[in-house]
Image (cartoon, rainbow, N blue to C red):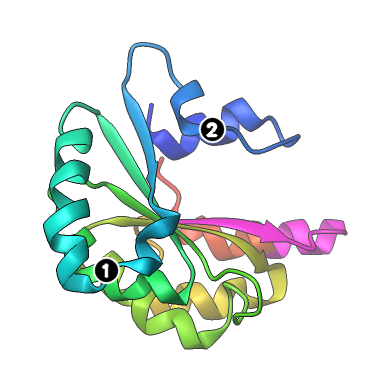
Amino acid sequence: MNIIQAMISEADSRYAVGCPDLIENIDTLASLRDASIMFSPDMFAEFVLPALREQMAWADNVIYHLDGPGAVCHLDHLLSIPELDCIQWTPGAGAADTDDPVWFPMYRKILGSGKSLQIFGVHVSKMKTLINECGGKGLFLGVREINTIMDQEYALSCAQPYRRT
């Protein structure tokens, strides 16, 4: 079972869950370093990256929570970690929403590196544009404002080309 399917199953449309609670017999690590914004990229490479690599080495699935524009300067270092499977992005308070095109180059960079990308707060009306601009392979969207059957059908039609069968 892949990690995203497990998250959806465990959440059961009620709440988000912590990654370590997802799957029995599979080690999953949700790693975050919100304090990373206080490190220069060089300091991050010297002091944080070795610990991250050591921590990530034992897990079967690794998601790193990249939190805010101040942490983006560490993205290249993070993408260089072979054990890292997925970046979970949140822009933080006061920044453009996750579905804003300002983030699309970063999304393409993450997906182009072979890592998956998890973003929440994507408005249903912006799904198609985001997927068309960034690609759907390896992309997990937490979609908001699905209020009608039409919204549901639209969201499913956007995701359909990327479903695994």
Give the residue furthest to the bottom: 102
User: Horizontally, is 110 left or right of 30 in the view?
Assistant: left
Which one is in front, 51 or 72?
51
* Image quadrant assignment for residue 110: bottom left
Q: In percent of the image, x 58 and y 28: which residue is there?
A: 9
Q: Secondary structure at mark 1?
A: helix
In the image, is residue 5 part of the stretch drawn in magenta?
A: no
10 Å crowding of disc 2: few (<14), some (14-19), many (20+):
few
* Image quadrant assignment for residue 153: bottom right
User: Horizontally, is 26 left or right of 79 in the view?
Assistant: right
Q: Is residue 99 above or below residue 15?
A: below
Q: Is residue 70 above or below residue 10?
A: below
Tell me where residue 127 appears, x and y as whole percent.
60, 71
Comparing labels 2 and 1, the label whose residue is closer to the camera: 1
Tell me where residue 91 appears, x and y as whole percent.
54, 71
Residue that mark 2 sits on: 18
Tell me where residue 73 appears, x and y as whole percent.
29, 76
Which one is in front, 50 or 75?
50
Q: In percent of the image, x 15 and y 33: which residue is there?
A: 57
C-alpha separation, residue under disc 2 versus residue under disc 1: 23 Å
Q: Amino acid at mark 2?
A: Gly
Write down the region rendered in magenta.
139-154
Residue 46 visible in the picture: yes
Residue that mark 1 sits on: 74
